[in-house]
Image: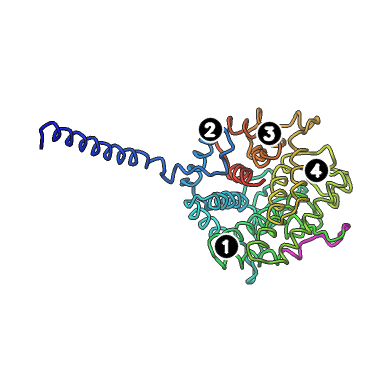
């Protein structure tokens, strides 16, 4: 072979080899971007890049948290559970372990009496906490026993066990959720002024007999709705619809407050009416919207959006002068846990989108409720 030709062949072979090495190197260099800890749910793809990166960092912190879950209130664990389930559904497989551990802890800490699974007690700290345990739920000087079960914690507990049972294929979780919901059917208001409605009581303690608070009814409705879909249980689905009918009836009557119109305090003092918007409405709005998603109900979704709008645009004297714990709808001033409710409606309202962006730009952390609201807000159209 001529020397010039041989030289040309060697050069071409070298170039081909170099190209192969370069391509392999490029592939290898790209691999780190696919690490699990960099998982970016499609549900946040509508957010600005900086906000996306913050949410991804918050997700990583949430899933890698070493904080002990022992002695945490069931309500807090419920939000953990829903956030983990939303991430798992979004494709983040790491969330499975978090979901399983949280659901198992709720299963282990449920209050039982004579073989009956009743629900979950309150383990948080409140100005209404009693010196020897328990809760003076309405500040009237009556202390419930420490093992009193509450519908707020119980609604989230049912939702958690039902979701985990569905996603993880754990029939025991589903069965337990059904037993708790069944137990609570004896704790509803006897007088039902609207057709086909259900009104869940605040707790199973006689101190709270007849007390009706709007948000806890929605929490129970959400638990029933999740169970109905997860277990293919039409009875649970019907309970969810009945509880939501009573909530819709409150708004039709012009009540925007915390207490329901059938509560004795509301009746005696007209304590809550159209001017008493506060932060409980934010959670009610997101839950109502998600009940609508589960049950394919435009009416429930419209209700959730309406509750959010009333809360988000509140401009009465109480909202203007209140601290963020009472009303946190202005994300430029408040980055409270429930301020994150804006993110659940960001695809439905320019105001929600703006407030969500403001919240994420300022928040130093994203609590589980906020993480859940952000994820479902990106998937619910």
Q: Residues within 10 Å of mark 4 (few under 14, many from 20)?
A: many
Seen in the picture, residue 61 relative to 355 is either above or below; the reply is: below
Q: Which residue is under mark 4?
A: 257
Q: Which residue is under mark 1?
A: 165
> Of helix, strand and loop, which one carries label 1?
helix
Q: Which numbered disc, 1 or 3, marks the residue closer to the eye?
A: 1
Query: Looking at the rendering, in which quadrant would you find the N terminus?
Result: top left
N-terminal-most mark, 1 or 3: 1
N-terminal-most mark, 4 or 2: 2
N-terminal-most mark, 2 or 3: 2
Seen in the picture, residue 18 relative to 249 is either above or below; the reply is: above
Q: Residues within 10 Å of mark 3 (few under 14, many from 20)?
A: many
Residue at screen point 83% across, 37% down: 275
Q: Which residue is under mark 2?
A: 49
Disc 1 to disc 3, C-alpha distance: 36 Å
> Of helix, strand and loop, which one carries label 4?
loop
Q: Which numbered disc, 4 or 1, marks the residue closer to the eye?
A: 1
Disc 1 to disc 2, C-alpha distance: 34 Å
Q: Which residue is under mark 3?
A: 324
Seen in the picture, residue 353 relative to 224 is either above or below; the reply is: above
Relative image position of residue 75 (x, y in whole percent): 63, 51
Disc 4 to disc 2, C-alpha distance: 37 Å
């Amino acid at each position: 072979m001529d020397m010039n030709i041989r030289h040309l062949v060697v050069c071409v072979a070298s170039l081909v080899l170099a190209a192969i090495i370069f391509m392999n190197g490029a592939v290898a260099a790209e691999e780190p971007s696919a690490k699990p800890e960099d998982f970016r749910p499609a549900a946040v793809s509508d957010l600005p890049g900086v906000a996306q990166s913050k949410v991804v960092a918050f997700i990583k912190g949430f899933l890698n948290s070493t904080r002990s879950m022992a002695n945490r209130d069931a309500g807090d664990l419920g939000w953990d559970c829903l956030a983990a389930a939303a991430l798992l559904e979004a494709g983040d497989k790491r969330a499975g372990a978090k979901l399983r551990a949280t659901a198992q802890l709720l299963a282990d800490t449920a209050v039982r009496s004579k073989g009956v699974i009743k629900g979950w007690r309150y383990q948080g700290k409140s100005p209404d906490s009693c010196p020897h345990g328990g809760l003076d739920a309405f500040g009237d000087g009556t202390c419930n026993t420490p093992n009193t079960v509450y519908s707020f914690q119980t609604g989230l507990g049912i939702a958690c066990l039902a979701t985990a049972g569905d996603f993880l294929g754990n029939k025991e979780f589903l069965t337990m959720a059904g037993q708790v919901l069944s137990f609570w059917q004896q704790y509803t208001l006897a007088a039902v002024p609207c057709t086909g409605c259900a009104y869940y009581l605040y707790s199973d303690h006689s101190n709270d007999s007849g007390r009706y608070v709007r948000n806890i009814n929605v929490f129970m409705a959400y638990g029933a709705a999740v169970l109905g879909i997860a277990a293919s249980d039409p009875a649970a689905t019907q309970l969810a619809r009945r509880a939501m009918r009573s909530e819709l009836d409150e708004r039709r009557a012009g009540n925007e407050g915390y207490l329901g119109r059938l509560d004795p305090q509301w009746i005696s003092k007209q304590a809550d009416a159209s001017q008493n918007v506060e932060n409980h409405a934010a959670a009610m709005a997101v839950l109502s919207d998600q009940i609508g998603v589960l049950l394919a109900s435009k009416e429930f979704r419209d209700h959730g959006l309406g509750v959010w709008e009333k809360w988000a645009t509140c401009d009465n004297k109480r909202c203007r002068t209140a601290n963020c714990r009472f009303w946190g709808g202005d994300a430029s001033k408040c980055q409270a846990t429930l301020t994150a409710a804006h993110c659940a409606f960001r695809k439905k309202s320019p105001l929600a989108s703006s407030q969500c962006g403001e919240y994420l730009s300022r928040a130093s952390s994203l609590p589980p409720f906020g993480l859940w609201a952000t994820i479902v807000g990106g998937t619910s159209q």
